Image: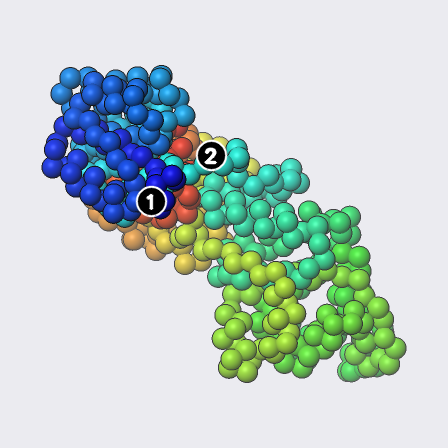
Amino acid sequence: MGKETQKRVLIVDDDASHRLMLRETLREDGYDTLEAASGEEALEVASKHPCDLVLLDLKMPGIDGIQTLKRLKAANPPLPVLIMTAYAAVNTAVQALKDGAFDYLLKPLDIHELKEVIETGMAPPAPRDHGPQLPPELDDLEIVAESGIIQDLLGDIARVAPTDATVLLEGESGTGKEVLAEAIHHLSPRSSGVLLHLNCAAIPENLVESELFGHTRGAFTGADSDKDGRFVTAMGGTLFLDEIGELPLPAQAKLLRVLQDGRITPVGGTREKKTDVRIVAATNRDLELEVREGRFREDLFYRLSVFPIRVPPLRERKIDIPSLADLFMKRFTERHRKSLQGLTPRAMSILVSYDWPGNVRELMNVLERGVILSRGDYLSEEDLPPSITGTKNDGAHPADTMRSGISLKEMEMMLVQRTLSENKGNRTHAARTLGITRKTLLSKIKEYGIDG
């Protein structure tokens, strides 16, 4: 880092040995440093020497870190101030965030995290971005996107939908690939046309080609009349080929030809028909492995994966669970004419703790069963199956002692607080567990005033 571009950090800490450690660490990374042993000295140094970031300890003699922060921000509002605090004083650090600090770190400092956060604090401000600007048409599909990973995924869908590119949705069973196929169709110029769903795994092998391309009368036993296949029925619209990895090799070859030249020949027929269909495919298999082992055509794989999208499992987006649970509870209480007002904190805590091998579909099934079984005002732990409650530790979480009537926002606050606690306050690890960005987690800490 050249001298003319060298960034300057003001280190404010009454512990001389800690200042020395920080000074040496930052200078090794090319930063210039200034030092102050008290809040008063920090204000004086900052008034005389411009700096790019302040690294501020909260607990100091004289004016404390909070008062120092307020006065630094009053004198220079854009100045990024990074708080250092002990774990026991996290509540004070949260107050500092409300007073203008851009982040806080727990002592003893993780040097890698320190460097990462300082680099972030010194980065030029990015244009205001509240996540992907998603079209309002997605609202009708009730897609929950609290997690950054799903927000990014929907942003990709919003960009590819207006094209005719073939999309391959890859992910475990039950992750919501069919809903995302609907989103692609609704955001495309073909939205006024039909969206047809064909589950390749549910069709007998000898009928797959007939289902896809149609057949002529007498083409095989039982073919008493001509029949249009899905490619004709979906003309002008979208054809969703679910479980594409189950397609037999002969049908794969014919599907490849259709994707290459846009023409089909019905089973038993001789005349070609032109098609105009957008293909969205989905699989829960590793198609690259299937290709290597000879069960899936390599050329078809590349034709299908023009725009691959990985759909994450529910365990990678746990911050979405409270909102998903709220959505499904409303849906099933209406469907089964129940008057449930929500879930108890204990029940929600169990849902968030579980890893959901069956993903969103399993969550839906568990909640529908619970709604049917429930006899109280709230769905409780007793209404959940043993396979779910059995994964919960015997020790009660502090949230379990809260009142029964609790809002979705309070549930989210509990989830963030619990994840922070389980990660010993490490927000980088907590954000990764929740499936959100560190920036989003920090925003939620500020919003809820989370103490921990």
Label drawn at residue 245: none
Q: Secondary structure at mark 2?
A: loop
Q: Label 2: which residue?
A: 125
Query: Which amino acid type is shown beneath numbered disc 1?
Result: Glu
Q: Is residue 54 visible?
A: yes
Classed neighbour count for the residue bearing mark 2: other residues with Cα under 10 Å, few (<14), some (14–19), many (≥20): few
**Residue at image coords 68%, 59%:** 165
Q: Is residue 66 visible?
A: no
Q: Position of residue 103 (x, y in %)?
A: 33, 33
Q: Label 1: which residue?
A: 116
Residue 441: image quadrant is top left
Relative side of 337 to 165, left or right:
left
The answer to whether residue 38 is above or below residue 85 is: above
Relative side of 385 to 283, left or right:
left
**How was this image coloured?**
rainbow
**Residue at image coords 55%, 83%:** 294
Query: Which amino acid type is shown beneath numbered disc 2?
Result: Pro
